[in-house]
Image: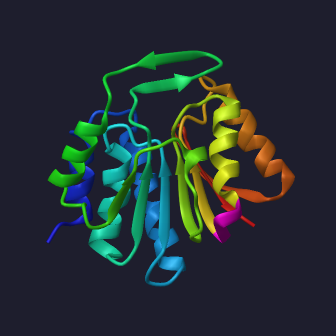
């Protein structure tokens, strides 16, 4: 039986930009979100790249909440960064993503949606959402706003790259908290977790 520790160790071998402290916070947030909402919570990840964060989230689900589902949304076009600052292009990540999910044994809990978030037609309640695609203000806003009405009250919302290197993320999250729609919970390195009021 796979354990949380084995999934955490597996994330270290996957290419990506999630620190160990951020991985730990993402896993703890997944535990908290799943434990709060019955046996079948839905988790949405926007921006998967090669699956580092997907394995962290999916590992928690597989080990502790096997009826939960992780929806990993990414066009896998290799474009990363921020449109207002710096965009880098890497080889398309779909093959490595699928390989990493299969190697981790997560095919039954992770559903790949190969598209941009704003193209996805959605109708399910969301108990946790992790936003980690492009890191400029307009992209983060589009990712968030497309799904926010489906996030249940007390649902968890995590953003990666909440740091001075990506001011668009900081501005968007700070404005969101200021509206009173969400409250800030915790921050580790550049991973911030907030909660829908």
Most common SS among magenta residues: strand
16 left or right of 188 in image: left
Q: Quick check: 62 above or below 17?
A: below
Using the image as rendered, state which of residue 81 and residue 158 is in the foreground: 81
Rendered residue at 45%/17% (across/down) = 88
- Using the rendered image of the protein, determine whether residue 187 is visible from the camera's viewpoint: no
Q: Nearer the viewer, residue 195 or 87?
A: 87
**Quarter of the C terminus within the rendering:** bottom right
Q: Residue furthest right?
A: 179
In the rendered view, tell whether residue 53 sits above or below residue 79.
below
> Residue 113 magenta-drawn?
no
User: Who's the residue at 59% across and 31% down the image?
Assistant: 135
How far from the left and from the top, in percent, is residue 45? 47, 52
Query: What is the number of callouts on the image?
Result: 0
Closer to us: 90 or 153: 90
Residue 17 versus residue 159 in the image, above or below: above
In the image, what residue occupies the spot 52% across and 51% down? 130
* Quarter of the image where one finds residue 155: bottom right
| Highlighted range, magenta | 149-154
Instruction: Say whether residue 177 is left or right of residue 78.
Output: right
Quadrant into which the N terminus falls: bottom left
Q: Is residue 150 magenta?
A: yes
Give the quarter of the image for residue 3.
bottom left
User: Where is residue 72 drawn, in percent x and y?
Assistant: 42, 52
Q: Position of residue 73 (x, y in %)?
A: 45, 48
């Amino acid at each position: 039986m796979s354990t949380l520790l084995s999934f955490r160790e597996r994330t270290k071998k996957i290419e990506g930009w999630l620190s160990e402290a951020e991985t730990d916070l993402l896993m703890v947030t997944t535990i908290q979100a799943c434990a709060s909402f019955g046996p079948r919570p839905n988790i949405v990840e926007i921006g998967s790249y090669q699956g580092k964060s997907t394995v962290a989230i999916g590992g928690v689900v597989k080990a502790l909440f096997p009826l939960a589902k992780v929806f990993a949304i990414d066009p896998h076009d290799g474009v990363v960064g921020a449109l207002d600052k710096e965009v880098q292009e890497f080889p398309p990540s779909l093959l490595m993503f699928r390989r990493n999910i299969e190697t981790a044994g997560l095919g039954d809990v992770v559903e790949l949606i190969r598209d941009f978030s704003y193209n996805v037609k959605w109708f399910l309640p969301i108990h946790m959402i992790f936003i980690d695609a492009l890191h400029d203000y307009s992209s983060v806003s589009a990712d968030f706003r497309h799904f926010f009405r489906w996030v249940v009250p007390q649902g968890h919302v995590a953003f990666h790259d909440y740091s001075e290197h990506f001011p668009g993320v900081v501005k968007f999250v700070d404005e969101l908290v200021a509206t009173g729609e969400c409250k800030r919970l915790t921050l580790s390195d550049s991973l911030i977790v907030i909660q829908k009021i």
